Image (cartoon, rainbow, N blue to C red):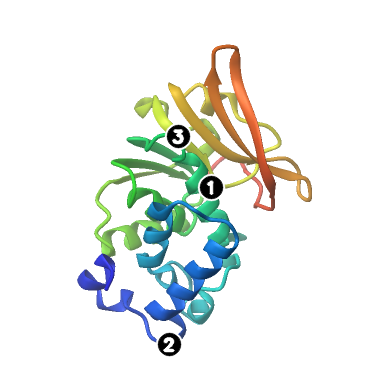
Amino acid sequence: MSRFARQLPEARGLGMTSQRARDRLIERLVAEGIRDRRVLDVLRQLPRHLFIDEALATRAYEDTALPIGQGQTISQPYVVARMTEVLIEHALPRRVLEVGTGSGYQCAVLASLVEQVYTVERIDELLRNARRRFRKLGLGNIRSRHDDGRLGWPDEAPFDAIMVTAAGAELEDALLGQLAPAGVLVAPVGPPGRQELLRVRAGAEGWQRETLAPVSFVPLLGGVA
């Protein structure tokens, strides 16, 4: 039984939301190339069905993105696993900034692995729902803010790692400026249909950009709603 199920009965799930359904998802992620056991263990335990509308709960452990309202989605589990895996590949960061809280699922994955997560969401309703989920699951190492995520969280910078969960046309200079000297940023970049997942690290000769895979994300928008 996962640690979440021990403290929260509804986290256990039944049928299509049961532990067996989660185990099948993990088997699929391994077959698709996810290797980091830390990431796989978190996704095995974390009740994804609590991060989506009850009407869609039976699809929670399919490897697909699902709508969460406000024109946003909860990312495909493979994408969540891959982005997390590449973020922590070289070192486990202590303090992580997430841009785009959304349902809160990716943030909860990060909070299960690192000491402190700071997450910024521009849509107030999504953030309020995510906060309720964090409290219910006992995730006390998350700080959240309703703001324009493109600005980051300068008052708490620098961060050991930054993850962006929506695609901008380019990398945001404000976010790069909030990375610690040895920090890493993972973000989708590009217009719809031509987005790529990038990992950026500071090197002796400036920023080192690594293209990881083609992806499809909602656009990174400014302002608040």
* Rendered residue at 58%/24% (across/down): 173
Q: Is residue 186 above or below residue 183?
A: below
**Image-quadrant location for residue 4:** bottom left
Q: How far is disc 3 from disc 2 in space, using C-alphas?
A: 37 Å
C-beta proximity under 8 Å, tags 3 and 2: no
Front tag of 3 and 1? 3
Q: Earlier in the sequence, mark 3 or mark 1?
A: 1
Circle 3 — which element? Answer: loop
Residue, disc 3: 90
* Rendered residue at 43%/68% (across/down): 48
Q: Nearer the viewer, residue 148 or 38?
A: 38
Residue, disc 1: 83
Q: Is residue 142 above or below residue 178?
A: below
Q: Position of residue 29 (x, y in %)?
A: 54, 63
**Image-quadrant location for residue 72:** bottom right
Residue, disc 2: 15
Few, some or many residues within 10 Å of mark 2 (<14, 14–19, 20+): few
Q: Position of residue 105 (x, y in %)?
A: 44, 58
> Horizontal placement of 106 versus 169: left or right?
left
Q: What amino acid type is highlighted by mark number 2?
A: Gly
Q: Position of residue 77 (x, y in %)?
A: 53, 62
Q: What amino acid type is highlighted by mark number 1?
A: Met
Few, some or many residues within 10 Å of mark 1 (<14, 14–19, 20+): many
C-beta proximity under 8 Å, tags 3 and 1: no
